[in-house]
Amino acid sequence: MADSSGGLVIGEREGTGAEGVRRCARHPSVETVVSCGRCDRPVCPRCMIFTPVGVRCPSCAQLRRLPQYVLTPRVYARVIPGALLLALGIGFLLSFAYPGLGFLGGIVVGYLVGTGLRRVSGYKQGREIEIVAGATVVLTVLASSMFYVVRAGGRLDAALRFAVSGQSLGVNVLGIVAGVYIAVQRLR
Ligand SMILES: [Zn+2]
Ligand SMILES: [Zn+2]
């Protein structure tokens, strides 16, 4: 990212007053006492980005998004079908154990989903893949309820309605919580 005001910033720094007031690197008309924790460029409130490691300027905050945290469209093109296959496959196996995914069942589902997504995503980490993992665990549980009804001779639309019913979700809530937790841990 080009920084045309670079020279200006250094000039301002030399002229820094006793109060430590400097001018924002991107908005020279705005005075600020805050600077980027990485490159020390002054940042005004509009430019400040709060990260887990402190205040960063927009350029340094961008650098922090390391490749293993970024899910590109190409990665999503692998992850979404992979997540659906995991949900359907594990859900089908789970339907033999239905009704009710207990705490232990949730741990098993979370482990399988987390491990599967780790592989399929190419060992991605971060918020995005964790959200995908949580959604996959929920889908897996819904799929298990659906397959249970279908295997018992129910029609598909009735099976889908049952899967998202309060009754189905109620007996599975503990398993979902445990599963999401374990799946997210597997991705860290
Ligand atoms: Zn910076
Ligand atoms: Zn600014």
Image (cartoon, rainbow, N blue to C red):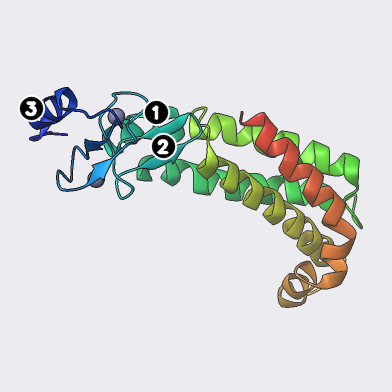
Residue nearer the viewer, 97 or 185: 185
**Picture disc at residue 7:** 3
Crowd class of label 2 (few under 14; some 14 to 19; many from 20; radius 10 Å): some
Could you tell me if the residues under marks 1 and 2 are in contact, i.e. CB atoms within 8 Å? yes
User: What residue sits 91% from the left and 48% below the top?
Assistant: 102
Residue nearer the viewer, 93 or 5: 5
| Residue 147: percent from left, percent from top | 78, 60
Is 183 positioned to the left or the right of 14 in the image?
right
Crowd class of label 3 (few under 14; some 14 to 19; many from 20; radius 10 Å): few
Element assignment for label 3: helix
The CB of the residue at mark 2 lies under 8 Å from ligand 1: no
| Picture quarter with ligand 1 | top left
Give the residue number, with chain letter if any, for mark 1.
Answer: 66
Give the residue number, with chain letter if any, for mark 2.
Answer: 70
Q: Is residue 179 above or below residue 66?
A: below
| Residue 134: percent from left, percent from top | 65, 48
| Residue 126: percent from left, percent from top | 53, 36
Which amino acid type corresponds to the residue marked 1 in the rendered image? Leu
Q: CA distance from mark 1 to mark 3?
A: 28 Å
